[in-house]
Image (cartoon, rainbow, N blue to C red):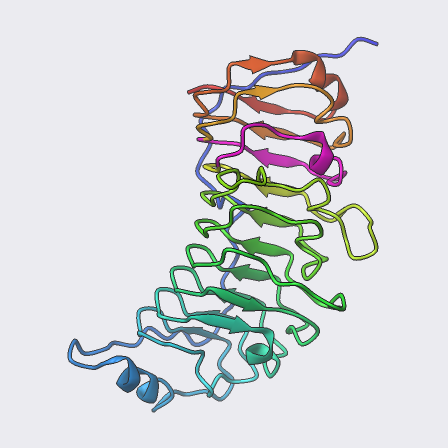
Amino acid sequence: MRWTLFVLLLTVPSQSEAGPQQEKASGFQLSPQRSPESGGSAAMASTCEGLPTAGATAWILANRSLERLPSCLPRTLQSLDCSRNKLLTLSVGDLSHLPELQQLTLHHNSIATLRWGLRAPPRLRALDLSYNRLNRLPRCVRIPRHSPSVLELAGNPLQELPPRAFVCFPALQQLNLSSTELGSGAQGGIAPAAFVGGAGEPMATLKVLDLSGTHLQQIESGWIRNLPNLTHLYLRKMPRLRTLEGDVFKMTPNLQQLDCHNSPALTSVHTHIFQDTPSLESLLFHK
């Protein structure tokens, strides 16, 4: 069989590491000011004062020194930005009274504990937990009926993904694990069954995976074979990635873009592996 691979060395606009930027919900946008003298408790006490909650669909509560999510969040809220605060934990129970919530942005907090499960808002589609302190993912006894399709975990101290790591998020389409510590631990980074669902099935929903800036030394067929519908794989700026070989793309025939831009140790690529990717349109290796 004859096949042709087009190698495109393009400079593309920067996008979200795990997919395109999400649209912000329309409605009331809140960017409250905080006096330098006010402490964390004072900021928490004043968070709900004077806010027009009736019908509000979008709040921005960034840089407020919040240690927990406010208790006054309106049921009509569709978008909530509590980035750059002092949150330590996130429990799905804190969101159960927000049936319209679609986008939750909590990057640059101190969240070290994530509790997820059956009470997730039914319309939540994007959860941004980038640059927190998560070193493990939640375990779910029962698979939630509702879960985000976009999960941002960039910059967390995750060293490994155990088997069935994303059972709590069965609807994932875009997953950002860039700049985590994957590959720096003793277990090698990603278990063969990391992307397996609760019933042992492959994670067929995932299309975009970003592993840029991690410490992985290779892409292993053991775990990537459980991502049969993967279309975009980002392996940018990976200092320890040395080779692409074997049958790593045997089970990802829908792969359209492979981006290895600025991975300086990648010196060996076995070109025959691309016979398994007939949909490949963009292959980036330039430094």
Residue 54 in the image: state x and y as whole percent. Answer: 49, 89
User: Is residue 16 rendered to the left or right of residue 167?
Assistant: left
Q: Please, what is the dominant secondary structure of the magenta stretch?
A: loop
Q: Residue at x 31, y 74 (%)?
A: 64
- Examine the rendered structure and indicate whether residue 113 appears above or below residue 176: below
Quarter location, residue 30: bottom left
Q: Is residue 256 above or below residue 185?
A: above
Q: Nearer the viewer, residue 278 or 218?
A: 218
Which residue occupies 62% across, 41% down? 190
Q: Residue furthest front?
A: 186
State which quadrant residue 7 falls in.
top right
- Residue 155 coordinates in the image, percent (x, y): 43, 49
For image coordinates 48% across by 81% down, the residue present is 56
Nearer to us in this view, 265 or 5: 265
Residue 26 screen position, x and y as percent? 49, 69
Figure label count:
0
Residue shown at the point (57%, 19%) measured from the top left: 243
**Viewport quadrant of the C terminus:** top left
Question: Where the N terminus falls, by quadrant?
Answer: top right
Left or right of residue 3, residue 232 in this image = left
- Camera-nearest residue between 54 and 128: 128
Q: Residue pushed farthest left?
A: 37
Magenta stretch?
215-237
The spot of residue 28 in percent (x, y) is: 43, 76
Asked if the magenta segment contains residue 266, the reply would be: no
- Is 57 placed above or below 113 here? below
Whether 228 is among the magenta residues is yes
